[in-house]
Amino acid sequence: MNFATILGRILEEKLRDRRRAEIARKINGSVTVECRDLGMSATVTFNGDRIVVENGYGGKYLTSADLQTLNGLTFGKIGLLDTLKLIMKGRLKIKGMMFAMKFRKLLG
């Protein structure tokens, strides 16, 4: 199973919640999610009711971390303060902080 498929399934599950689906509709743009320790990446593009997940790089924004950190962010185990600590330690890289906050709200 490739990274885009995994990420797509996680998003499908999250979007079953009406509140999260509404958040997704308001997001416009694309983000590459990079899992550094596995050497994998996927790009998620939001455009109204349409969400496309593809393998590889291509997003205007970037969220890059190891698998443990990405899991923590995806499943709400890492709060805002811990997120800032991870950024300061270099374990989490974010390009496009405002977009990342919306994306995190959708996932968290």
Image (cartoon, grey):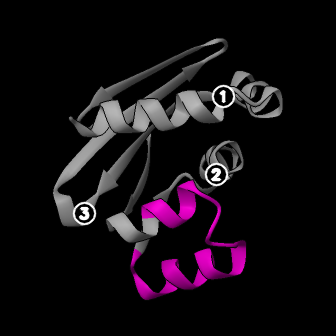
For the residue marked with disc 3, what is the amino acid? Arg
Q: Residues within 10 Å of mark 1 (few under 14, many from 20)?
A: some
Q: Which residues are magenta?
A: 70-91
Q: Are marks 3 and 1 in contact (CB under 8 Å)?
A: no
Residue 93 makes an appearance in the image: no
Q: Is residue 88 magenta?
A: yes
Residue 26 makes an appearance in the image: yes
For the residue marked with disc 1, what is the amino acid? Leu
Percent position of residue 38, x then y:
18, 59
Look at the picture and state if 53 lies above or below 1: above
* Residue that mark 1 sits on: 15
For the residue marked with disc 2, what is the amino acid? Arg
* Residue that mark 2 sits on: 104
SS for callout 2: helix
Q: Residues within 10 Å of mark 3 (few under 14, many from 20)?
A: some
Look at the picture and state if 73 lies above or below 7: below
SS for callout 3: helix
Percent position of residue 78, x then y:
62, 72
* Residue that mark 3 sits on: 36
Q: Nearer the viewer, mark 2 or mark 1?
A: 1
Q: Which mark sits nearer the N-terminus, 2 or 3?
A: 3
Residue at left offset 16%, top offset 56%: 39
Residue at left offset 70%, top offset 72%: 80
